[in-house]
Amino acid sequence: MHEAARIMNRQETIVLIGAGSIGQAIARRVAAGRHLVLADYNEANARLAAKTLEEAGFDCSVTRCDLGSRTDICALVEHATARGPVKGVINAAGVSPSQAPVTEILRVDLYGTSVLLEEFGKVIAEGGSGIIIASQSGHRLPALPEEQNSALATTPCEGLLALPFLREITDTLKAYQYSKRCNVLRVMMEATRWGRRGATLNSISPGIIITPLANDELHGPRKDGYLRMIEGMPARRAGTPDEVGDLAAFLMSSRGRFISGTDLLIDGGCTASYWYGDLQYLKTTH
Ligand SMILES: NC(=O)c1ccc[n+]([C@@H]2O[C@H](COP(=O)([O-])OP(=O)(O)OC[C@H]3O[C@@H](n4cnc5c(N)ncnc54)[C@H](O)[C@@H]3O)[C@@H](O)[C@H]2O)c1
């Protein structure tokens, strides 16, 4: 659509940050007939996703955005609200333990997601919804002391990375787990604010989902460990981005309006098995 016509026609808008496999699967299910903003740190990823989606009938715009930067997030809010009322926000951006050092994981996954919730919580439209992709990994962290839970949930964003227990983290897996735990707690805290605007907000914690990232693991040096984990979980297989997409679409639909401020695990039973089943051996390594 021509830019001037688009702005005059102000469409309901869906914002996807992180135009990877899981993000695209969700967008396909919720963005038909709406304007879809694709935001990614790697603009080439977002452009590629936009091309595929536009060829399938979606109306997209692309913008580069680093989730870990408040400036970029505010620019994204401006870009999206100029298109139309923001009916959906999907955060499927993130860096995994093998992709980045501790400081980068905390900056992007923990701090960035918290800022995103704060900034889009100011503009989300009545009847809108937000989905944050957390991870089963956050469910493997033992219960935290209440002061830590409360600090992760309520500390103003700009103070989060200075929390003493976060500054002590030296291991990337722990940084990822704390980040994903923080996502879930932050969603609980922000659900009240989003609710005042008539919007719902939830997180989804996927288990092993076949994406290029997981495929690398399944064909790399940790392949045997991964295959053993898959065999030991109740579903006895990995998940697909489409299955996460279906869950997100339900939460973002009219049927999900009574669900807010919660986290849904979609992991083929892996977490249950980690704590009390065949995967307990992982407790010493994961
Ligand atoms: N695939 C899995 O098995 C799995 C399991 C649990 C959780 N997750 C989570 O799901 C989310 C999506 O992962 P995916 O498997 O679709 O991976 P993916 O690599 O296909 O997509 C991730 C996208 O995030 C973007 N990104 C990375 N850093 C960014 C930043 N600073 N700012 C903006 N964009 C950034 C990447 O460029 C990429 O396009 C991540 O948060 C990941 O932690 C994935």
Image (tube, rainbow, N blue to C red):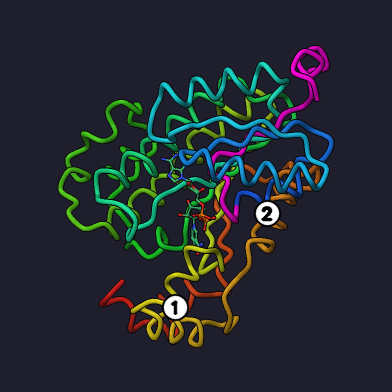
Tell me: 206 left or right of 27: left
> Which residue bears the numbered disc 2?
25
Tell me: 134 left or right of 62: left
Q: Quadrant of residue 246?
A: bottom right
Residue 168 spot, x, y in % from top left: 15, 48
What quarter of the picture does the N terminus occupy?
top right
> Which label sits in the foreground, 2 or 1?
1
> Which residue bears the numbered disc 1?
219
Asked if the magenta segment contains residue 4, the reply would be yes
Q: Which amino acid type corresponds to the residue marked 2 in the rendered image?
A: Ala
What quarter of the picture does the C terminus occupy?
bottom left
The residue nearer to you, when weighing 101 against 90, is 101
**Total number of numbered labels?**
2
Residue 282, placed above or below residue 68: below
Residue 82 spot, x, y in % from top left: 67, 16
Q: Is mark 2 within 8 Å of ligand 1?
A: no
Residue 51 spot, x, y in % from top left: 69, 43
Give me the residue at 54% from left, 25% from top.
76
Residue bounds of the magenta highlight: 1-22
The secondary structure type at the circle numbered 2 is helix
Give me the residue at 53% from left, 50% from top.
133
The secondary structure type at the circle numbered 1 is helix
The residue nearer to you, when weighing 176 against 121, is 176
Residue 172, placed above or below residue 191: below
Nearer-N-terminus badge (2/1): 2
